[in-house]
Image (cartoon, rainbow, N blue to C red):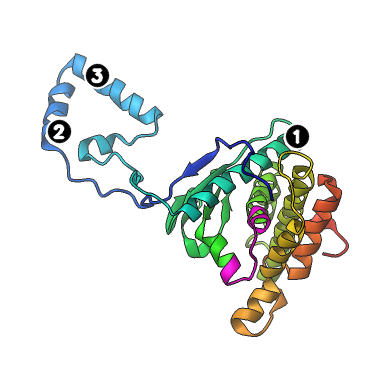
Amino acid sequence: MKWRSNRRSTNVDDRRGASSGRSSGGGLNPMLIGLLLKLVTSKKGLIIVAIVAGVMYFTGNNPLNFLTGNTNNQIQNTTYKGSAKENELAAFSNRVLRSTEDVWNKIIPNYKEPTLVLFTGSVTSACGGASSATGPFYCPGDDKLYIDLSFFEEMARKLNAPGDFAQAYVIAHEVGHHIQNLTGMNRKVQSMRGKISQTEYNKLSVMLELQADFYAGVWAHHAKNMELILDAGDLKEALNAAHAIGDDRLQKQSTGRVVPDSFTHGTSAQRMRWFKKGFETGDVNQGDTFNARSL
């Protein structure tokens, strides 16, 4: 896949090397407390305190942090330097995200672009904390997709799914979940949790994941006619990746047996089928996995 000359996205939050925990801060600052007490005993001082508190509130800062010295929710490691290979993956992911933006802006009027968060080790999102072991994920609470770039190495080494277009498929799949968030499909599925059996909910989850695969295929269909230039074998890389992360294949590898009722993402054949359908048609209206006669 030829991507190096493509434009960059401005919606990438590079947190590699950052701590995902909150800084511990310190105890109450005696000098600041003394100053605060003096201010609140005068009319002019009360006005100043009210203004400062108001500004901190509307900018999202906790006024108590001012008293404790704890002003950072996330500690950035400004000296972090990734390897040449990792930095290339970061640049690649940026270009792929930009390609998804170009495609979906063309398909969806007033498309709200998601943010791609790159992290190492662990990260905190609106959906809670997660480690690299979680794998790439999309959080509907903050419209962001999260990826530890080491996952791409695991795809090649552990899942036998190498290739840049296989990696692009992963990003496009998570963007597919963002599309579902915009259409309200995510909320519809989540609203059924606890109202139906776990087996039935798993079936809905499979439909949701297969639709995200379909949207990834739709992206690829349009991307090949826009900035991204596909090389021979790129489609095979994506299909191989879809096959590698099928529930049946992963379960058989890890436990030696397959339990269909526990599937949450779909079989290898299903994931390949829906990605290929999106790639061949490029028509978002043909991706209704929830009303399909068969998956």
Amino acid type, residue under disc 2 in the picture:
Ile
Q: Does the stretch in magenta take in 159?
A: yes
Q: Secondary structure at mark 1?
A: helix
Q: Measuring from the top left, give residue 8's x and y in whole percent.
A: 58, 37
Q: Residues within 10 Å of mark 2 (few under 14, many from 20)?
A: few
Q: Which residue is mark 1?
A: 106
Question: Where does label 3 land, which residue?
Answer: 48
Q: Residue at x 57, y 60 (%)?
A: 152
Residue 175 sits above or below residue 132 on the image: above
Cα distance between the residues tagged 3 and 1: 49 Å
Q: Is residue 281 magenta?
A: no
Q: Are marks 3 and 1 in contact (CB under 8 Å)?
A: no
Residue 144 seen in this snapshot:
no
N-terminal-most mark, 1 or 2: 2
Residue 293, how many percent across, how many down?
Answer: 88, 62
Amino acid type for the residue under numbered disc 1: Lys
Report crowding for label 1: few under 14, some 14 to 19, many 20 or more residues within 10 A (C-alpha): few
Q: Nearer the viewer, residue 201 or 80?
A: 80
Residue tagged 2: 33
